[in-house]
Amino acid sequence: MARAGVTVERLAEAAAELADEVGLANVTVSEVARRFGVKDASLYSHIRNAHELRVRVAVLALAELADRGAAALAGRAGKDALVAFANVYRDYAKEHPGRYAATQVELDPETAKASAARRHSDMTRAILRGYALAEPDQTDAVRLLGSVFHGFVSLEQAGGFRHHPRGADESWSRVLDTLDVALRSWPTGADDADASRTP
Amino acid sequence: MARAGVTVERLAEAAAELADEVGLANVTVSEVARRFGVKDASLYSHIRNAHELRVRVAVLALAELADRGAAALAGRAGKDALVAFANVYRDYAKEHPGRYAATQVELDPETAKASAARRHSDMTRAILRGYALAEPDQTDAVRLLGSVFHGFVSLEQAGGFRHHPRGADESWSRVLDTLDVALRSWPTGADDADASRTP
DNA sequence: AGTTTTTTCCTAGGACTCCTAGGTAACCTA
DNA sequence: TAGGTTACCTAGGAGTCCTAGGAAAAAACT
């Protein structure tokens, strides 16, 4: 009988597709095997276990996302870059919910190093070139941006914004405006102004 | 033979405990049953399916978190309230990772309504009383805060901050400083200042 | 108290997933 | 073309989810 031509790359691709359809948690070795017209046991010569399947989806998604981010950043700076990059995240999550969810699986140190995770923080740092920030503020800002992007997308996907008439799109663009302002007026040194007296 | 005294409340509590130990994804009907000294099939007179078990953990966590939030907010205002409330989230996530993860499961409309989800947005709105914001800016700000809190905690938990010497605690307090400043200087109307010309 | 009803737990079992062990057949290389 | 490697197979054990139908404990009603 002819071989199915399974490779780890095609496996990851199929698993990613499946994740987008049924959610990452429902990505199963058996189903992926089925899509290749192969028995589930056969896949274990390509992957160690079911977890590796999800890890490979994560690595794939991280790389795709980094590619899109790089494309969006090309030729842009300042707020323009910030907005473009942010939209890459949100659009990707909408288009590929399963892949995006995979982005959050914990990777062991070696896998993380070989992944595009570093490219993401580098790109975020590149955005911050438009806003004069020295270390360690720059790292803090990178983390702020990552938190807002992921947090918003995650809450939106979980349906957290559906119980209120205000559109998510409007909030999103307003949040990015605010982020832009915040980065420009980054609290430099020991800023202990007490806001509780600000009415 | 004597009965084990299983109730949905005790079930949810046990599932929550299990979630904190092994992760929400590994919360299984069989294991919960085992902890009650009961066969797995017996639990199906209390819950409909395994998914309901996780939903109940979510509802429990949401309520606990809301209680802590309310306690933290009592007698505080402005930045003081903001910081206290934010720390409730982060501390809870550290203390109860499984419960916190459950917080992000999608709830059907009725369950969501009966949950403490509303209390959370109400409390966030209460924080914003310290910063004069009218609708719809207030809703946008609520979403920004939610995004930052959840995003930061989520990334930190996924190990996203471990590959850099800068401590997560320092970044966190800096992020909250920035949030405080951002809320005070919220971009009111049509703020289209182009930041790309700022350097 | 005795009887009926309800609830809680049981056993049995089917369907599915994960994964291992060991075998066979296709492809690659010397 | 023989030998070796790799991709796939069957068989099966262990675990989970869930249903069906039965027994016994607890609660409710005479």
Image: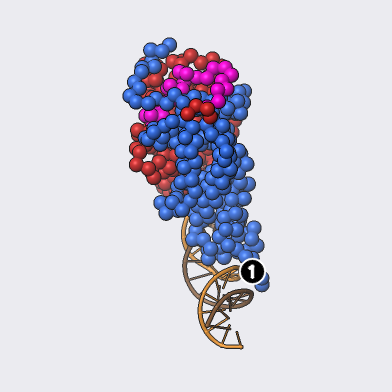
Chain colours: A blue, B red, C brown, D orange
Highlighted range, magenta: B172-195
Q: Quadrant of residue A198?
A: top left
Q: Residue at x 61, y 46 (%)?
A: A20
Looking at the picture, tell me which residue is in the foreground, B102 or B36. B102
Q: How many marks?
A: 1
User: x%, y% of residue C12?
Assistant: 54, 57
Q: Amino acid at mark 1?
A: Arg
Q: Which residue, given by chain and number where applicable, does mark 1 sit on?
A: A3
Q: Residue at x 60, y 38 (%)?
A: A91
Q: Residue at x 62, y 41 (%)?
A: A95
Label 1 lies in what chain? A
Residue at figure coordinates x 54%, y 15% from the top left: B134
Q: Nearer the viewer, residue B68 or A51?
A: A51
Crowd class of label 1 (few under 14; some 14 to 19; many from 20; radius 10 Å) = few
Residue D15 rendering spot, x and y as whole percentages? 47, 55
Asked where in the image residue B99 lies, by quadrant, the reply is top left
When the figure is inspected, residue B75 is found, relative to residue A102, above or below; the finding is above
Q: Nearer the viewer, residue C5 or B29?
A: B29
Q: Is residue B97 visible?
A: no
Expressed as whole percent of the image width and height from the top left, the position of residue A30 reads 58, 58
Q: Position of residue B8 (x, y in %)?
A: 48, 36
Does any portion of residue B54 appear in the rendered image?
yes
Q: Is residue A67 above or below residue A12?
A: above
As drawn, B57 above or below A183: below
Is B184 included in the stretch rendered in magenta? yes
Residue B44 in magenta stretch: no
Compared across the picture, whether B113 is left or right of B150 comes to right
Secondary structure under tag 1 reads loop
